[in-house]
Image (cartoon, rainbow, N blue to C red):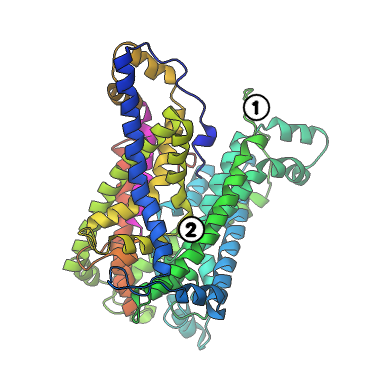
Amino acid sequence: MSTSLADRTETSSSSEPPRSALGTVVAVLRERALVTTVLVILSGLIVAPVAAIFYGAVRTGAPGMADQGFTLTAVREVYTTGPYLATLGWTLLMAVGVAAISTTFGACAAWLLTRTDLRWKNLFELSVIAPLFLSPFVGALAWVALAAPNSGMVNVNLRWLLDTDATFVNIMTFTGVVFVLNLYYIPYGYLFVSSALKNMDPSLEEASYLNGRGVIATVRHVTFPIIRPALLAAFFFIAVLATGIFSVPGVLGLNATFNVLAVEVYRSMSIWPTNHARGAAIGTLLLWFTVLGVYFYRRAIRHASRYVTISARGTRPRVVRLGWVRYLISAVFLGYLLFATLLPYVALGIASLNPFTITDFRQMQFSFNNFLEVASSGRIVDATINTLVLGVVTPTATVLLGLAAAYCVVRMSGRTGAVVDYLATVPIAIPGIVFATGMLWVYVRTPLYATLTLLVIAFMGTYIPHAARFAGNSLMQIDPALEESSRVTGASRMRTLRRITLPLSKPSLLSAWVLVFVFVVREINTAILLYAPDTQILSVVAWGYIQDGTVRNAAVVGLLQTLVLIGGVLIARFLFRVKLSSTQV
C-alpha cells in the first residue's frame, strides 16, 4: 500500500529559471526553512514518542512522577518470562494466520475479478473493498451480539428451535478473532494483488496459452511468479497490522484463554494496579516484530517493478470462462458480503432496537425508544461532537503535513528528503496502542494532556504515512516543467504551489483526506489510552459499554459511528467529487 517516495523519485528540477544571486539565496533559505520545519514537526510527532517508549520501559514509576529511578525489572519480566513469551506466540500466530488467509483470499478475488468472465464484477469489487470503510471494532461488537457462546442471537435461537443446550458457534475464541480480522483485512490483500494483475503485461499469459498450457499451468508458471512481490507485500503489510491491533482481540478475547500483546499493553496501562513500565516494555517487544515486518514489506515492494511490466500496446488479458463454476463463485462473493457487511449490521440494528439485552427472537420488543434514549444522552452527544471535530481537523492537518513532507521528498530530494521520507513512513511499523504509550510519557505533564489537541497530534503521527503517500504519488505525476514555466514568468514558489501544484494535486489530496477521515472516525487503538472524560470519542464510549456488559448500548454507538463514516464518505463522493475506487484506496 505504501512505498517509499524516495525510492521512486527522480531528479525533478533539472532546469531552474535564471534568477539573481540574491533571489537564489532567498530561494535556498526558504527551501531549507521548509525542510527544517517539516523535520522538526515529524521528529516531535514520531521520534519523541518512540524514544519515550524505551525510556518508560526502564523507569520505576508512572509517567510524570518525580523521583524515579532506572530499572530493568519490567524489561526482564516481559522478555524472559513464560506468560509474556506465550502471549508473544499467540500474537505472532494470529498475525501470520490472518496475513496468510487474507492474502490468499484477496489474491483469489483479484484474479477472479480481473481474469474471468464472472458477472456483476463491479458489485463484487465493491463488496470486497467495502469493509475498508467500516470499523473492525464495530464489526467485533456486532459479532459478539451475533455469536457469543451464551447470549449470541445464533446460539439462543437455535437452542429453542432445536430444543437443545448446545453451543453452535463461539466467536470469543482464537479462531473467532482470526475470522473477524480476516473479514476486514481481505480488502488489503485484494488491493495489492489486483493492482499487480492490472499492471502486468497480459501478453505473457497469452504466450503461455498459445504454447498449450492451461489456466492452472499459466497461473502457476507465469502469473504467480510475476505477482509474487505483491503477494509478499500484502502478507507482511497485513501481518504488521494484525500484530498491533487491539480492538478486535480486546472485544472478542475478554473471556478467552488466549491473549495478545496489544491487549496486554492496555491492561498494564489502564487496569489497576497499573504498571506503566511493564506496558512500555511490552510495547517495545511488540515494536521489534512490527519493524521486522515492515522491513520485509519494503524489501518485497522494492523488487515489485522488476517483475511487473506495464505494456504500451494495450493488450487485454484473455478472459477465462468459468462455466457453471461462476455461480458457485458468485455465491462465495455474496457470502463474504453477507458476513463482512450485512449480517453484522443487521445484528447491531436488532440489538439497538430492544429495550433490554434480549437475544431471544420470541421475547424481543422492537422500539426506537432505546436507540433514541442512548443516542440523545449527553455522553453520546459529546462523543459524537468530539468524533466529528477530530474527523475534520485531523485529516486536514495530516494532509497538509503530508503534502509538505512529500514536496520535500519529491521536489527537493537529496539526503534531507530521504530523512523526511523515512520519518513519514516509520509510523506504519508502530501499533496504535504502542504509539499512545509513548505519547503518554511525552505529554502527561504538559497542558496538552487530556485534550482533543493531543488526540489530533497522536492521530497525525499515526496516519501521516497515508497522507504523504497520496500527496507524493500526486506530485510525481505532475510534470515539473509546469512549475518551472510558472517560475520563469516570475511567480514565486509559493504562488506556483498555490496556482499550479495544488489544483493538479487536488483529487489525490481529497482522496487522502477521506481515507484519513475514515481511519480517525473508527479509531480506538490510540485513543483508548489518551482520552479523558470530556474528550471521549464514539469508539471509546462503545468500548466502555462492552466492558460494562451493555451490548445493546454499544450497538447504538456502533451504528452511530457507522452513520458518521457513511455520511462523510458520501459527502466526499458527491459534494467534492472524490473518486473512491480500488485503485485509490
Tell me the amino acid under the disc marked 2: Tyr
Looking at the image, which is closer to me, 357 or 396? 396
Residue 83 part of the magenta-drawn span: no
Mark 2 to mark 1 CA distance (whole Å): 33 Å
Q: Which residue is rendered at x = 54% and y = 72% of the image? A: 79
Q: SS at mark 1?
A: loop
The stretch in magenta equals: 504-523
Picture disc at residue 512: none
Q: How many marks?
A: 2
Q: Quadrant of residue 265?
A: bottom left
* Residue in the image at 23% along x and 72% along y: 370
Residue 465 percent coordinates (x, y): 43, 45
Q: Position of residue 404 (x, y in %)?
A: 35, 36
Chief secondary structure of the magenta span?
helix
Q: Is residue 466 shown to the viewer in this render?
A: yes
Q: Quadrant of residue 531?
A: bottom left
User: Residue at point 37% right, 40% down?
Assistant: 402
- Rendered view: 166 above or below 555: below
Determine crowd level at label 2: few under 14, some 14-19, many 20+ residues with C-alpha closer than 10 A: many
| Element type where label 2 sits in the image | helix
Question: x, y (%) of residue 409?
Answer: 44, 34
Residue 520 magenta: yes
For residue 184, the mark is 2
Residue 334 x, y percent position in the rendering: 53, 56
Q: Nearer the viewer, residue 497 or 246?
A: 497
- The residue labelled by disc 1 is 315
